[in-house]
Image (spheres, rainbow, N blue to C red):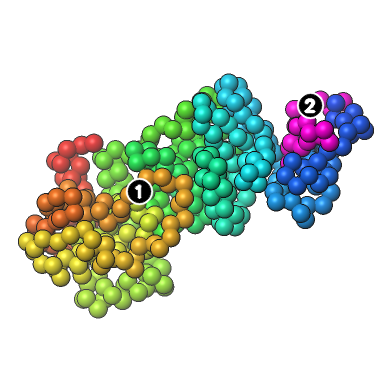
Amino acid sequence: MLTATTRKGKSITLARLSKQDITQLRQTESFVCPACKSEVIIKAGNIITPHFAHVSEAECPERTGGEGEYHYQGKLLLYEWFKRQGINVLLEHYLSDIQQRPDLLIQIKNRKIAIEFQCAKVNSQTIYQRNIGYQRANIIPIWILGANLFKRKSTHHIQLNRFLTSFIHQFSRTHPTTLFFFCPEKQQFSFVQDIIFTTNHKALAKQTFTPMYDISFNHFFLKKTFSKSELFTLWNNELKSFRLGKRPNFGQERAWRTWLYEKGLHIDHLPTYIYLPIRSQYKMNVPLWIWQSRVLLDFLPRVSQHKIFHLNEVERFLQRFIKKKVDEQLIRASHNPIEEYLSVLCEFSLLKQLDDVTFVQQQSLTFYKQIEEALDGDTELLFRFMYNEGNK
Ligand SMILES: [Zn+2]
């Protein structure tokens, strides 16, 4: 930990003191952990950030083990960054009512925000509990991930896992989904926004990299999203790799293949609508094509053309593909992936929306005869959608 208290209750951050001061303190003062009140000792040397360590950590509710240099540096840099902007900020302030100690606690007007700089993979239950605590104390948590956890695949692609996904923020319905990263070595923020899953572990996202001192905290709330034409141009490539790419032949994917095969179908034949981008895909437990194909090939034939159907019928039909519990606690907006999908199908004129929850199928589905036709068909459909149906 960077900050501890003296026996008299004064809060001391070693990293903000000179070497001489630290040497003097070592001889004259003793320190305790603000959380468990047990003794802590000074750790300082030439190459490490001066900090405190428990003599014995066993009883501490705020176990700080696993904090390395990267984490210390990051915390201090972020602390200075907020301070420079004139923002009221506390480093490792202990909140006794919820027994938590956020890396930084800032206050803007009467709103409290806890900033956590997370550089190590920890049990997701720990993160969950912390967020619950903040919620109880009416504090907004913002988790900034260490850039060491960022897995960039290309200009527009990132790799995700369940751990990273649980840190996706969405401050309101009109904000894009966002992941925040910070690299203390480069002193740089990376913002990953408008995250659109393409497979279980890959997503399209807007990525911005900015030196920390070029921006202020307001930048955390900027809304960068893909325009409709950008998204559908990128999606054309996704469809192409969906049709041509090598795919795993186990688990969900294998079961889906078998299901297709039993229908006498192959990926080459499937209509373009089978794999369309949906922003709230994180709520589903299977990749896009698995549940979208069920809607097109099982649900729609069941209601048949020109018969009215309701959103909740589709939801009921897809029940087993919807996550029971969503890990993404930091997403404050409620979006419905199925509703989103139906409304995209309306934009493509496959369906027509009669009111908020009622739909009717307007056209029959066409299946492609072979792969070349499918690839051309995908491109044509996406481009028609982008340019004829009004651009965002
Ligand atoms: Zn302690």
Q: Position of residue 277 (x, y in %)?
A: 30, 51
Which comes before the other along the chain, label 1 or label 2?
A: 2
- Image location of residue 333, percent across then percent down: 37, 45
User: Looking at the picture, how far across and down is residue 40, in whole percent?
Assistant: 82, 43
Residue 391 sits above or below residue 285 on the image: above
Would residue 147 be visible to someone looking at this image?
no
Q: Quadrant of residue 369?
A: bottom left
The one of 20 and 363 positioned closer to us in this rendering: 20
Q: The residue under label 2 is which amino acid type?
A: Leu
Circle 1 — which element?
loop
Q: Residue at x 78, y 52 (%)?
A: 57
**In-front residue for pair 241/178:** 178
Q: Which residue is mark 2?
A: 17
Residue occupying the far left of the picture: 306
Instruction: In this rendered view, identify the residue nearer to me: 187 or 283.
Output: 283
Disc 1 versus disc 2: nearer the observer: 1
* Mark 2: few/some/many CA within 10 Å (<14, 14-19, 20+): few
Check the picture and name the quadrant holding the C terminus. Answer: top left
Residue at 26% x, 62% y: name it.
315
Crowd band around label 1 with a 10 angstrom C-alpha radius: few (<14), some (14–19), many (20+):
few
Report if residue 13 lies within the magenta region: yes
Q: Which residues are magenta?
A: 1-20
- For this view, does 173 lie left or right of residue 101? left
Residue at image point 23% right, 61% down: 312
The residue indicated by pointer 1 is 334
Identify which amino acid the numbered label 1 is placed on: Ser
The number of numbered badges drawn on the structure is 2
- Taking depth in this image into account, of 280 and 135 the one nearest to the observer is 135
Where, quadrant-wise, is the N terminus in this rendering?
A: top right
